[in-house]
C-alpha cells in the first residue's frame, strides 16, 4: 500500500538529542493538526499545531539548538503546552501520551480519504458522521449511489469532484511518472552509495529502462558478505523512509516519502494546461504527500551483474534471455549463468560463468550489449544476435530544439532569456513556436505580434552572425488545429515562418470522435504545405488523461510519403515528462518509416528547456539514432531542410 495508509509518530533512531529532525517535528505537528480536526478538536488548538508545523518547517536554525536555548517558546503561536511537547520529543525522543492515543483511535480509512484531492478533514468528518463511511472505497460507493449530493454543503458538483478525485488518487498510486520516479530513485541511490561497505549500487527495473511510468523502484547493491548487517542498518537509517516493509538477508523493502528530499518536494516548472489536466493544485498536494516503494537487493560483488540484469528486466526480455541460455545448455537467473545443475540459488552461483558486468553476460550468450532502455523484447534480442543494435542518441548530440514558448504567448521567459539559456546549454539553435490566437487560454499571439517577433529574430541572428557567434533563433509557431484540419493563422502569415508545429488543443472535439475521423483530419493537417511538425500527436497527459483515438501508424505512413519526396513532415516527441508523446513504441515505427522525430521540450520557462533529457531517454527507448532526429542537425542543415515546402 502506498500514500496515506495511516499516520505514525516517528520513533527515534538516535541515542542522544536531537532525537528528531526539523522535518520530522514539522510533519508530526501537521499530522496532529489533521487528526485533531478529524476528531472535532477546538479550532484554536488545531490552528496552533498547523502554525507550529509551518514555523518549524521553515526554520533556518537547528531544531536541537532552538529547543536547548528555549527559543522554541518564542515562536509566534507556539504556546507553552506545545513548546513542552516539542522540547521533550527533541530531547528525550518521547511523544505525549494523548498524541499516541489520537493516532491509535483514528481509523486508517479516514486518513486514507485525506489523500483524495480536494477533500479535507472537515468534509471527511462530516461524511464519516452522516454516512458512516470509513474508507475510500466506501466513500466511492456512496458517491456512485448519489448519497453525497443531498448532504448539506455538498451538492452534485462536489459529489462529481469527489469521484474524480478518487480516480486521480487511484491512478497516482498505481504508477508514477518517470521524472518523479527517477527523482526518488536517484536521490535514494546516491545516499546508498555513501554507506560504508557498499561497493557499488545501481538503479534497476523500469526506472533504469526509462519507462514512461514507474511502479516501484528496484536497486541492486554489491557488498562484501561480512558487511551485510552494517549495510542493511545503514540503509534502514537513511532519511525518507516512511515505513519498512521487510528486511531480510538479501533484500530490504521500504516505502519512501518526500522527506527524502532536502528542502522538500516541488513540482517546479509546469505548464498551466498540463497542470490543469492532472488535477490542478490538488495534484501538487498529492505529489508532496506522495510515497513510492523501493526494493533494494544486496548481493556479493561477483553476483552483482547477474542480479542487476535480472532486476532490470523487463520480464519479457528476461524470458528471451533465459531461453537463449537454455538453447546453449545453460541456466540463467539472478545469481548467475550456470551449466545445468541441481544446486539452486546462491549455491548454484558458485558454478556460474564469471561476469564483471552485463556486457560479459550478453557476450556469453553470443549477443552484443543491449542498452537497458531497449530491453522490452521489441526486437532487441534479434538485433543483438546480428550486431544490428542501434547507436542510440545521447544528450550531448542535441544541438537545439524546435518547440518552445516565450512571454509572447504563455511562456514565462522572454525571447532573449530563452536564447541565452539555450546557448548556455551548448545548443547552436533554438526554435521559438508561440501559440496561435485561437488558443485564448494560452494567450495565443496575434499575427502582427508574431511577425514583429520574427523581425526581432532576424535582427538578433544578423548580429550574432556579424560578431561570429555560433547561435541562431529559428522562427515558427505552434498553430492550433482548427475544424476540418485547418491551421490557425492565414496561409500568407504561415508562409512567412521558418516552420509550423501543428497541434491539437481542443481535446474535447477530438476525444468525442472515432479513430477514423481523427486520423483523416490529421492527414489533412499533414497535407497543409505549412505543416512541418505534428505536435504532441495524441494529446495524452501521463497519469492525467488518455489521448484521443487515432491510427498513428496510418498517420506516420502518410507522413513518410512526403518525406520520401524530400518534403519535411516531422513528428514531435514532446519531451515533457507529463506527455512523452509520441510514445516510444511508435518512435521505433517512425524511424522505420524514415519520418524524422523532433524532440521538443515544449518549454514554457527556462528550466522547461531541460526537459529535453526525458525526450532523449524516451527517444533512446524508441531506438532513435543520430540521423533519426532533427535536434542533432546543424543550423544550416536544418534550415536547408525547412526551405523545401510542398
Ligand atoms: P514496474 O515496477 O511495474 O514499473 O516494472 P518493473 O519492470 O520494474 O517490474 P518489477 O518491479 O515487478 O520487477 C523488476 C524486474 O524484475 C522486472 O523488470 C523483471 C524482473 N522480474 C520480476 N518478476 C519476474 C518474473 O516473474 N520473471 C522474470 N523473468 N523476471 C521477473
Ligand atoms: Ca519496479
Ligand atoms: Zn507548446
Image: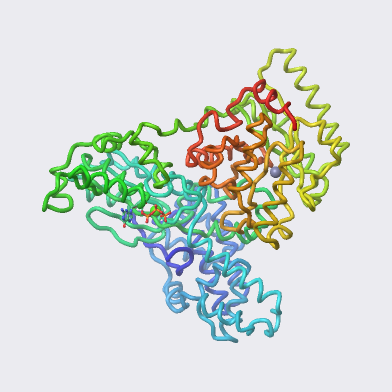
Left of 563 or right of it: where is 331?
left
Quadrant of ligand 1 in image: bottom left
Res 285 → quadrant: bottom right
Residue at screen point 62% across, 29% down: 400
- Quarter location, residue 45: bottom right
Q: Position of residue 637 (x, y in %)?
A: 64, 22
For the residue pair 216 and 290, the one nearer the viewer reads as 216
Position of residue 185 measured from the top left corner of the image (x, y, whole percent): 43, 47
Label count reads: 0
450 on left or right of 207: right
- What x and y, as percent, mark residue 198? 28, 41
Image quadrant holding the C terminus, namely top right
- Residue 506, compared with residue 386, is above or below; it is below
Name the colouring of the figure: rainbow
Q: Which of these two is toward me, 346 or 42?
A: 346
Name the one closer to the observer, 418 or 85: 418
Q: Nearer the viewer, residue 226 or 33?
A: 226
Specify the quadrant that holds the N terminus.
Answer: bottom left
Amino acid at each position: 500500500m502506498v500514500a496515506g495508509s495511516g499516520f505514525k509518530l516517528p520513533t527515534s533512531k538516535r541515542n542522544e538529542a536531537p532525537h528528531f529532525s526539523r522535518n520530522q517535528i514539522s510533519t508530526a505537528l501537521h499530522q496532529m493538526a489533521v487528526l485533531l480536526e478529524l476528531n472535532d478538536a477546538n479550532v484554536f488548538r488545531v490552528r496552533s499545531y498547523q502554525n507550529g508545523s509551518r514555523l518549524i518547517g521553515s526554520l533556518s536554525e537547528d531544531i536541537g539548538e532552538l529547543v536547548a536555548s528555549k527559543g522554541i517558546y518564542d515562536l509566534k503561536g507556539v504556546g507553552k503546552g506545545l513548546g513542552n511537547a516539542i522540547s521533550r520529543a527533541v530531547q528525550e525522543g518521547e511523544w505525549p501520551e494523548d498524541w499516541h492515543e489520537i493516532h491509535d483511535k483514528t481509523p486508517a480509512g479516514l486518513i486514507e480519504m485525506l489523500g483524495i484531492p480536494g477533500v479535507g478533514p472537515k468534509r471527511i468528518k462530516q461524511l464519516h458522521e452522516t454516512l458512516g463511511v470509513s474508507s475510500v472505497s466506501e466513500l466511492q460507493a456512496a458517491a456512485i449511489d448519489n448519497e453525497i449530493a443531498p448532504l448539506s454543503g455538498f451538492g452534485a458538483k462536489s459529489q462529481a469532484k469527489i469521484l474524480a478525485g478518487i480516480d486521480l488518487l487511484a491512478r497516482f498510486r498505481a504508477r508514477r511518472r518517470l521524472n518523479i520516479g527517477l527523482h526518488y530513485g536517484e536521490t535514494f541511490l546516491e545516499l546508498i552509495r555513501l554507506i560504508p561497505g557498499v561497493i557499488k549500487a545501481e538503479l534497476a527495473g523500469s526506472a533504469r529502462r526509462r519507462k514512461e511510468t514507474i511502479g516501484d523502484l528496484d536497486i541492486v547493491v554489491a557488498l562484501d558478505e561480512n558487511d551485510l548487517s552494517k549495510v542493511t542498518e545503514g540503509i534502514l537509517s537513511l532519511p525518507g523512509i516512511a515505513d519498512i516493509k521487510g528486511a531480510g538477508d538479501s533484500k530490504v523493502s521500504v516505502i519512501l516519502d518526500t522527506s527524502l528530499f532536502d528542502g522538500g518536494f516541488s513540482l517546479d516548472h509546469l505548464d498551466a494546461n498540463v497542470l490543469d489536466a492532472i488535477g490542478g493544485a490538488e495534484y501538487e498536494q498529492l505529489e508532496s504527500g506522495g510515497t513510492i516503494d523501493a526494493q533494494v537487493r544486496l548481493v556479493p560483488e561477483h553476483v552483482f551483474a547477474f542480479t542487476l540484469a535480472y532486476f532490470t528486466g523487463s520480464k519479457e526480455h528476461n524470458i528471451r534471455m533465459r531461453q537463449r541460455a537454455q538453447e546453449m545448455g545453460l541456466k540463467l537467473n539472478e545469481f548467475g549463468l550456470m551449466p545445468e545443475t541441481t544446486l539452486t540459488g546462491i549455491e548454484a552461483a558458485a558454478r556460474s560463468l564469471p561476469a564483471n558486468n552485463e556486457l560479459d553476460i550478453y557476450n556469453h550468450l553470443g549477443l552484443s550489449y543491449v542498452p537497458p532502455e531497449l530491453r522490452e523484447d521489441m526486437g532487441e534480442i534479434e538485433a543483438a544476435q546480428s550486431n544490428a543494435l542501434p547507436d542510440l542518441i545521447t544528450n550531448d548530440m542535441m544541438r537545439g530544439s524546435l518547440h518552445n514558448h516565450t512571454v509572447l504567448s504563455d511562456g514565462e521567459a522572454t525571447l532573449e532569456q530563452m536564447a541565452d539559456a539555450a546557448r548556455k546549454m551548448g545548443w547552436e539553435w533554438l526554435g521559438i513556436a508561440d501559440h496561435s490566437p485561437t488558443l485564448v487560454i494560452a494567450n495565443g499571439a496575434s499575427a502582427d505580434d508574431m511577425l514583429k517577433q520574427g523581425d526581432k529574430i532576424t535582427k538578433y541572428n544578423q548580429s550574432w552572425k556579424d560578431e561570429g557567434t555560433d547561435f541562431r533563433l529559428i522562427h515558427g509557431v505552434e498553430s492550433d488545429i482548427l475544424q476540418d484540419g485547418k491551421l490557425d493563422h492565414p496561409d500568407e502569415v504561415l508562409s512567412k515562418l521558418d516552420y509550423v508545429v501543428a497541434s491539437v488543443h481542443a481535446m474535447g472535439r477530438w476525444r468525442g470522435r472515432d479513430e477514423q475521423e481523427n486520423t483523416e483530419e490529421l492527414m489533412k493537417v499533414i497535407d497543409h504545405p505549412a505543416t512541418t511538425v505534428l505536435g504532441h500527436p495524441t494529446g495524452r497527459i501521463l497519469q492525467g488523461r488518455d489521448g484521443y483515438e487515432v491510427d498513428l501508424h496510418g498517420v506516420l505512413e502518410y507522413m513518410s510519403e512526403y518525406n520520401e519526396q524530400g518534403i519535411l513532415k516531422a513528428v514531435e516527441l514532446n519531451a515533457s515528462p507529463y506527455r512523452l508523446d509520441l510514445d516510444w513504441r511508435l518512435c521505433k515505427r517512425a524511424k522505420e518509416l524514415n519520418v524524422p522525430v523532433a524532440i521538443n521540450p515544449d518549454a514554457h520557462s527556462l528550466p522547461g528547456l531541460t526537459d529535453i533529457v526525458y525526450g532523449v531517454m524516451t527517444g533512446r527507448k524508441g531506438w532513435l539514432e543520430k540521423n533519426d532526429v532533427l535536434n542533432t542537425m546543424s543550423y544550416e542543415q536544418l534550415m536547408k531542410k525547412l526551405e523545401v515546402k510542398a
